[in-house]
Each structure stands twice: as structure tokens, then as C-alpha cells.
Amino acid sequence: MFTGLIEAVGVVTQIATVGDSQLKLTIESDLIVEDTRIGDSVAVNGCCLTVVEIDNHVFSVEVVNETILRTNLSLLQPEDKVNLERSLRVGDRLGGHFVQGHIDGMGEVLQPPPKSCHKTSTKPCTACGPKRLHSYKRSQLDSGRDRSR
């Protein structure tokens, strides 16, 4: 479980293909490596992934095919920045919400907000007009069920 609050911003240092359908992301982050062990969960851009390697100030996670299909993690390039959060431990202080980090699908931005807008919610945007909501739709999931609403 996670709080959904970003602990650190890491930098992707390497991307490798593992087998036929997996990616291995290597990410630099001193804070995350500080007390993380192999097998721990780390949210990378909100997606729960398992740490498979740790070396000095970098750690690696593997991204399986199902996660590749349902996230934008396969679009990452070396030197891209990613949002990171270590998983909660019993007794940790909660400053956000309970978040699993399990991804159901991707959305598609139909119309980006203007640069003057800083809203990230679906509430009316004062920069765009009081009756304007930023629109998005959910993509059809790989299972064939249409989840767009």
C-alpha cells in the first residue's frame, strides 16, 4: 500500500528488455535506495513495481507485459524523471490516502488544458471558464471489455 504522495523524483538511467515481454528499468534515487531491499515494492509514476536489484544509488524494477499494456511505462526513456514512493510499513504516518498502485488501464487526454491552467481535477477551471471541465476518456482495456465512460 502507498499514500499516493510522491517521496522523491528519480531519473531513469537505463532501460533493458528482459525475455520476450518484460522491461527492466534502472532508476537513480538516493532516498529510495536508502532503506529499500530487493523484493520491496516501489510506486513508479503511481504503479506498484518490485525491486529486483540495488546498486549504490540506483535500483532496478521489472515491468511485466500486463503492466506494459496498461501503463505508459514503456514510453520512458533514459534521463526521464519519474515520481517515486516506497510502500507503507506498519506504523508509518499516513499523510495521503491508501493507494494500491494497481493499474486498470490508461486514459487519453482529449484536450490539454491551456498553459495558464494549473487544475488537475475535474472541477470547473477558472482559467478556462466556469463551465469548462478538462475532458479525458479511458482506453479500452486489453481484455476486450469496453471500459470507456
Image (cartoon, rainbow, N blue to C red):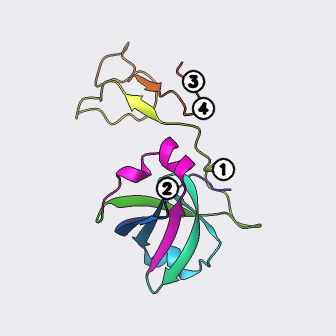
**Residue at (54%, 18%) from the top-left corner?**
149
Work out how far the residue at label 2 is from the one at label 1, CA to CA, in angstroms: 24 Å
Quadrant, the N terminus: bottom right
Residue at image position (43%, 52%) is 73
Coordinates of residue 24 in the picture (x, y in percent): 46, 66
Q: Quadrant of residue 137?
A: top left
User: On residue 134, which mark appears?
Assistant: none
Residue pointed to by mark 3: 147
Residue under numbered circle 1: 100
For marks 2 and 3, the one nearer the N-term is: 2
* Residue at left offset 44%, top offset 58%: 83
Amino acid on which disc 3 is placed: Arg
Where does the magenta region start and end?
58-77
Q: Mark 4 or mark 1, which is nearer to you? A: 4
Q: Residues within 10 Å of mark 1 (few under 14, many from 20)?
A: some
Which numbered disc, 2 or 1, marks the residue that appears first in the sequence?
Answer: 2
Q: State the CA–CA distance, disc 4 to disc 1.
A: 21 Å
Position of residue 126 relative to residue 88, above or below, is above
Q: Is residue 129 left or right of residue 65?
A: left
- Percent from the top left, x then y, of residue 50? 60, 65
Q: Secondary structure at mark 3?
A: loop
